[in-house]
Amino acid sequence: MEVGQKVYVNSNGTVNGIREYEIKSIGRKYFYIWHDNSERTIKKCSIESLSEVDDFRPADIYLDRQKLSNSLEYRALSDELERVFNWRNIGNLTLDQLRQIKRIIDGGEEVE
């Protein structure tokens, strides 16, 4: 981590909420980031947790945009699978769909 390095923050949990910030300064425990070189956008962040220091809703800080995109995709897929595999919804799946899911979970052949 170094001053001037680009970092990425997601403010709303979607791809549209990704913002690019720049590291303004680095201390022993905290670093500060800003957006568009504006003092109004400065955020205090923890070096240890790579998250914004905010009592309301701290955002995670990512040093790599792809890791942030992967995290959002993981969260979206997890939410979708949780919804699908809810006991009330599992009855909506066909036997063939259930077999395909089991084959994937067991590490069998990929299903097209």
Image: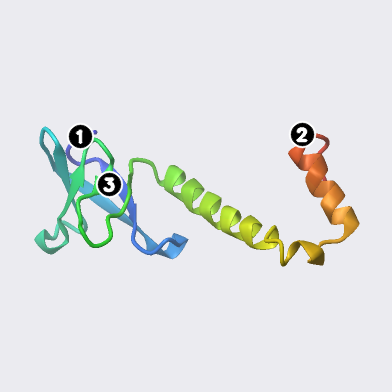
86 left or right of 4? right
Q: Are marks 2 and 1 in contact (CB under 8 Å)?
A: no
Q: Mark 2 points at which residue?
A: 107
Based on the displayed image, in which of its 4 quarters is residue 48 positioned? top left
Position of residue 27 relative to residue 60, above or below, is above
What whole-number distance in Å separates the C-alpha atoms at marks 1 and 3? Answer: 16 Å
Q: Do the residues labelled 1 and 3 touch (CB within 8 Å)?
A: no
Q: Name the residue under label 1.
A: 2
**Residue 20, x across and y down, in percent:** 31, 53
61 left or right of 40? right
Query: Residue 102 or 51: which is nearer the viewer?
Result: 102
Give the residue displayed 82% in from the left and 34% down from the top.
108
What's the image's color scheme?
A: rainbow
Secondary structure of the residue carrying numbered label 2: loop
30 left or right of 70? left
Q: Mark 3 points at which residue?
A: 51
Mark with earlier residue (3, 2): 3
Give the residue displayed 30% in from the left and 54% down from the top.
59
Give the residue displayed 10% in from the left and 36% down from the top.
27
Q: Can residue 1 be seen in this view?
A: yes
Secondary structure of the residue carrying numbered label 3: strand
Mark with earlier residue (2, 1): 1
Q: Tell us which disc is closer to us: 2 or 1.
A: 2
* Three-letter code, disc 2: Gly
14 left or right of 43? right
Q: Which residue lies furthest to the right in this view?
A: 96
